[in-house]
Image (cartoon, rainbow, N blue to C red):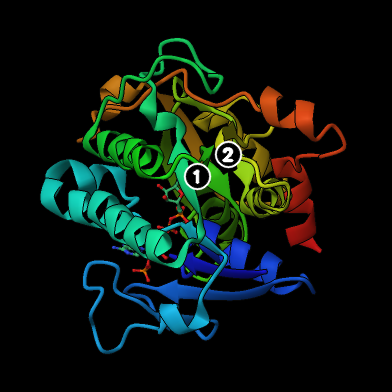
Amino acid sequence: MKILIFGASGLVGGNMLKFFSQKEDMEVVGTHFSFETKETVPFNTLDLEASTNFDVASFNPDIIINCGALTWVDYCEENIDESYQKTVVSTINTLKIAKKLHAKYLYIGTDYVFDGKKGPYTEDAEVHPLNVYARHKLEAENLVFKHNKEALSLRITNVYGNEIRNKNFVSRLFNLAQSGEHHHLKLPYDQYATPVNAMDIAKAAYLLLKDKKTGIYNIASTDFVNRMQLAQLVLNSVPNHKVTTEPISTNELNPPANRPLMGGLISAKFLAEYPEFKFANVSEFLSEKMK
Ligand SMILES: NC(=O)c1ccc[n+]([C@@H]2O[C@H](COP(=O)([O-])OP(=O)(O)OC[C@H]3O[C@@H](n4cnc5c(N)ncnc54)[C@H](OP(=O)(O)O)[C@@H]3O)[C@@H](O)[C@H]2O)c1
């Protein structure tokens, strides 16, 4: 089976690329947009005719996975057009490619489609996005299913894991703690989510794709924590760190983009179909890192 991953220079796409590359029955190519890596090839999803684009038609993938989006939530709030281009237009363009090549399409969705009044959420809960990023992610997901009834969307939240740029909260905090430097962080105590390891998303995607599943699946661990609790999990794993934390409300932090507070996802649907699947938790990931 041939797989093409758009956005493989990022956290989720990078882990997908790593996982699928190890499978003997898979041939996989991952693309970057602006951040070149040793493992990826260039592809500008906003200019399908760019001469530097990887030749997707010749590769002729059976499956296209779209991990590309503008994921910086507060930046999206103030750069609406750029967010629309990099999240919605890039999805429209990659859907066109999938249609032309008769490839299965996998989209990556988010719990930010919900308003955070009653999380964690199941797949069929009513959507109500609170910010620009979330509205664009929902618009793109709706377009996916409008144009491709056989598509798959994995909704995820609060992803952590190994990545080249180490941008995710857990990895950044872990590095900060390990640096031995003094830092004082104000963290929201009222934003809850269900953190998930990016490698588990790749493993779940593999199972769902092999079984030709369609529709929306939540992919989330059973950890349900707020940012302060998540930070404590990380800091507890690093002896003698010099990082102090202070709980603060999201209201006081006053970020440019509104956040769903009681967010998170319930993966009961996925686990009912794959009862053997075991989601990693943050502590396991950190103890691996400590080795
Ligand atoms: N991380 C989370 O907690 C989280 C939660 C919910 C949902 N998601 C979703 O999961 C997906 C992957 O997120 P991530 O955390 O892996 O984000 P990330 O690390 O920021 O990676 C985003 C990827 O998208 C690429 N990209 C940006 N604009 C693009 C475009 N126009 N065309 C093609 N690729 C483009 C980036 O390429 P360059 O870096 O090369 O420019 C990068 O490879 C996104 O759809 C995101 O909305 C993530």
What element does badge 1 sit on? Answer: loop
Q: Residue at x 33, y 34 (%)?
A: 138
Answer whether labels 1 and 2 touch (C-beta < 8 Å).
yes
Q: Nearer the viewer, residue 39 or 262?
A: 39
Quadrant in the picture for residue 180: bottom right
Q: Is residue 240 above or below residue 229?
A: below
- 188 horizontally vs 251: left or right: right
Q: Which residue is mark 1?
A: 151
Instruction: Tell me residue 245's x, y (percent).
Output: 49, 36
Instruction: Tell me residue 139's x, y (percent).
Output: 28, 37
Q: Which residue is mark 2?
A: 214
Mark closer to the chain start, 1 or 2: 1
Instruction: Tell me residue 91's x, y (percent).
Output: 32, 54
Q: Residues within 10 Å of mark 2 (few under 14, many from 20)?
A: some
Camera sees residue 239: no
- 139 horizontally vs 282: left or right: left
- 150 horizontally vs 257: left or right: right
Instruction: Tell me residue 84's x, y (percent).
Output: 19, 49
